[in-house]
Image (cartoon, rainbow, N blue to C red):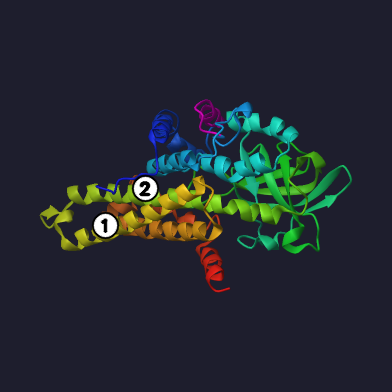
């Protein structure tokens, strides 16, 4: 399909795109169906990603990273994984969601301890915010970390934690000051094998089957003071500061997934015949394709602008929220309409549109629901 020329990327980004595509072709796609059956990816693919330079692009070179804060490299990675429909290997979670907490908040000792493994793929990471009774409302977090002098005593439970089974480092949001409200939370890094840290079941989701998602339990876990990220009681401010990038990353993936599934469907309606002629000859089909192509083009222009602004340090939380809710809701609509255009074949799991229908549905929920995005935008306009 003809799309407006994009000016977001330079030759260096397109060269990186080829590296990502090669990695997907050789290391991911041949195994993805098995990973979906297993409920998790192989550990070795993380190390392979590290060898290919796909982990920690924003980490300083002295720790094995790419040494660049240009978010466009992350956007390329997200786009290619979305285009391939490879939902199992959560590199963006590692790079774009957990990574900033380690690069911006960790002290020198912590960086030396964690970042080399972060960039090599030897240490898989996760962030544990959501609880059984607290999702988008981070002020409702009940997990507690009690000061015991040289360590914290961590107690609580988290759920829906992506990378929860494979993670070696988990950044846990816990309440360190009971009366502190949103100002009484801290970030603690819990390492694999710590006494009292247990993983529950690998949750059975309707989509993204290859991406391990788990319950985590903390019972009298002794977390050394040396595993506190940043300052005590400042977690809420840190979370708010990093959520814009998380939401933009989701928007990038959603916009790309919508484009990809429309391309797949456009090819399908050209080939599939009904009433003795291709579906594409029917005016209704042409109008559906025209509407979706136009919506995708408008969304792409806005999301690309947000990526450019973020790479230049200008993206604010409001526009990130706009991008997140619009792109994910658009993706949901496009996938649903494209499945309808496939007819009965769209309901068959071997078709890409059926897998996209299941894998992409979560996008309007995680990273902050659509309703929360609208609340953030509305508050900014009606103060």
Residue holding disc 1: 341
Q: Is residue 331 above or below residue 68?
A: below
Can you say which quadrant of the picture contains the C terminus? bottom right
Query: Is residue 121 visible from the viewing direction of this image?
Result: no
Numbered tag placed on residue 178 in the rendering: none
Q: Which residues are magenta?
A: 43-55
- Where residue 68 appears, x then y in whole percent? 54, 35
Residue holding disc 2: 349
Query: Is residue 315 visible from the viewing direction of this image?
Result: yes
- Where residue 239 appears, x then y in whole percent? 64, 53
With 4 as the anchor, is 243 left or right in this view? right
- Where residue 27 appears, x then y in whole percent? 45, 29
- Where residue 326 appears, x then y in whole percent? 43, 60
Q: Is residue 208 above or below residue 49?
A: below
With 34 as the anchor, is 239 left or right in this view? right
Lower position in the chain sequence, tag 2 or tag 1:
1
Q: Secondary structure at mark 1?
A: helix
With 81 as the anchor, is 49 left or right in this view? right
* Residue farthest toward the left in the current orientation of the protein: 276
> Any magenta on residue 45?
yes
Q: Secondary structure at mark 2?
A: loop
> Any magenta on residue 164?
no
Q: Residue drawn at (49%, 40%), measured in percent from left and top?
A: 74
With 306 as the anchor, is 107 left or right in this view? right
- Which of labels 2 and 1 is toward the front? 1
Q: Residue drawn at (52%, 27%), measured in percent from left and top?
A: 48
Q: Residue drawn at (58%, 53%), measured in percent from left and top?
A: 243
| Residue neighbourhood size for the residue with mark 1, other residues' Cα within 10 Å, grouped as few (<14), some (14–19), many (≥20) | some
Q: CA distance from mark 2 to mark 1?
A: 15 Å
Q: What's the magenta bit mostly, secondary-structure-wise?
A: helix
């Amino acid at each position: 399909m003809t799309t407006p020329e994009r000016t977001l990327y330079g030759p260096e980004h397109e060269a990186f795109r080829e590296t990502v595509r090669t990695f997907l072709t050789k290391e991911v796609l041949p195994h993805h169906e098995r990973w979906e059956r297993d409920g998790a990816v192989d550990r070795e693919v993380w190390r392979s990603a590290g060898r290919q330079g796909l982990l920690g692009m924003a980490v300083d070179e002295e720790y094995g990273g790419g040494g660049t804060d240009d978010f466009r490299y992350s956007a390329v990675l997200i786009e290619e994984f979305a285009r391939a429909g490879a939902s199992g290997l959560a590199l963006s979670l590692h790079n774009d969601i957990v990574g900033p907490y380690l690069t911006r908040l960790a002290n020198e000792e912590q960086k030396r301890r964690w970042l080399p493994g972060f960039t090599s793929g030897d240490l898989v990471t996760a962030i544990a915010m959501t609880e059984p009774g607290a999702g988008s409302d981070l002020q409702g977090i009940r997990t507690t970390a009690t000061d015991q002098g040289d360590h914290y005593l961590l107690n609580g439970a988290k759920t829906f934690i992506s990378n929860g089974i494979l993670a070696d480092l988990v950044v846990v949001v816990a309440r360190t000051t009971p009366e502190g409200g949103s100002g009484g939370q801290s970030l603690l890094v819990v390492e694999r094998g710590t006494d009292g840290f247990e993983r529950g079941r690998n949750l059975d989701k309707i989509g993204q089957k290859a991406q391990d998602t788990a319950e985590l339990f903390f019972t009298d876990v002794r977390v050394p003071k040396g595993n506190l990220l940043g300052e005590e009681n400042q977690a809420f401010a840190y979370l708010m500061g990093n959520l814009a990038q998380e939401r933009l990353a989701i928007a990038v993936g959603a916009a790309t997934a919508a484009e990809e599934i429309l391309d797949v469907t456009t090819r399908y309606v050209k080939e599939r015949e009904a009433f003795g002629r291709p579906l594409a000859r029917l005016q209704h089909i042409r109008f559906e394709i025209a509407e979706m192509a136009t919506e995708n083009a408008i969304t792409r222009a806005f999301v690309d602008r947000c990526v450019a602004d973020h790479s230049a340090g200008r993206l604010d939380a409001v526009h990130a929220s706009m991008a997140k809710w619009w792109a994910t809701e658009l993706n949901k609509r496009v996938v649903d309409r494209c499945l309808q255009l496939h007819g009965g074949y769209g309901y068959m799991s071997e078709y890409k549109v059926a897998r996209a229908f299941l894998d992409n549905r979560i996008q309007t929920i995680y990273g902050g629901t659509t309703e929360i995005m609208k609340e953030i935008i509305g508050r900014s306009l009606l103060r």
